[in-house]
């Protein structure tokens, strides 16, 4: 294997790792928030929470990925 192939494989593996971590954080956040939001919550609140969970998932995965 040459250096170019190693770089491509590393970037592919790192991207997959980052996506898996992001999905795990988003799923965990969704489960935690689902315990606290009532069943008859306003649709605007639920939409805002989903956006917040998405942002937390992305930010959390970047933080974990760059942590030494």
Image (cartoon, helix red, strand yellow):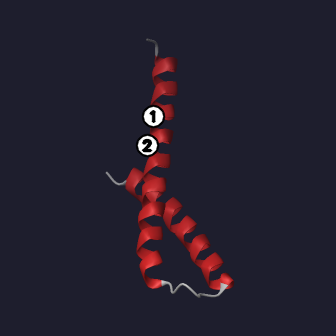
Q: Residue at x 56, y 73 (%)?
A: 52
SS label for mark 2: helix
- Residue 48 at x, y = what percent? 62, 78
From the viewer's perspective, is residue 27 above or below residue 16? below
Residue on which disc 2 sits = 17
Task: Check the picture and name the quadrant holding the N terminus.
Answer: top left
Does residue 64 appear left or right of residue 15 in this picture?
A: left
Q: Which mark is residue 36?
A: none
- Residue 65 at x, y = what percent? 41, 51
Q: Residue at x 44, y 84 (%)?
A: 36
Please rate how many residues cluster around mark 1, counting C-alpha atoms within 10 Å: few if below 14, some from 14 to 19, many from 20. Answer: few
Determine the residue located farthest toward the top in the rendered image. Answer: 1
From the viewer's perspective, is residue 66 above or below residue 15? below
- Residue 2 at x, y = what percent? 46, 13
Q: Residue at x 59, y 71 (%)?
A: 50
Would you identify the image quadrant in which residue 32 lies? bottom left
Determine the residue located farthest toward the left in the rendered image. Answer: 68
Q: Residue at x 52, y 26 (%)?
A: 8
The Cα–Cα distance between marks 1 and 2, rounded to whole angstroms, is 6 Å
Would you identify the image quadrant in which residue 14 lies? top left
Most foreground residue, 13 or 45:
45
Residue on which disc 1 sits = 13
Does residue 32 appear left or right of residue 8 in this picture?
A: left
Q: Are marks 1 and 2 in contact (CB under 8 Å)?
A: yes
Most foreground residue, 47 or 34:
34
- Residue 12 at x, y = what percent? 51, 32
SS label for mark 1: helix
Please rate how many residues cluster around mark 2, counting C-alpha atoms within 10 Å: few if below 14, some from 14 to 19, many from 20. Answer: few
């Amino acid at each position: 294997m040459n250096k170019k192939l190693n770089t491509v494989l590393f970037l592919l593996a790192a991207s997959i790792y980052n996506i898996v971590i992001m999905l795990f954080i988003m799923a965990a956040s969704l489960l935690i928030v689902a315990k606290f939001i009532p069943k008859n919550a306003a649709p605007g609140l639920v939409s805002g929470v989903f956006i917040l969970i998405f942002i937390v998932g992305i930010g959390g995965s970047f933080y974990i990925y760059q942590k030494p």
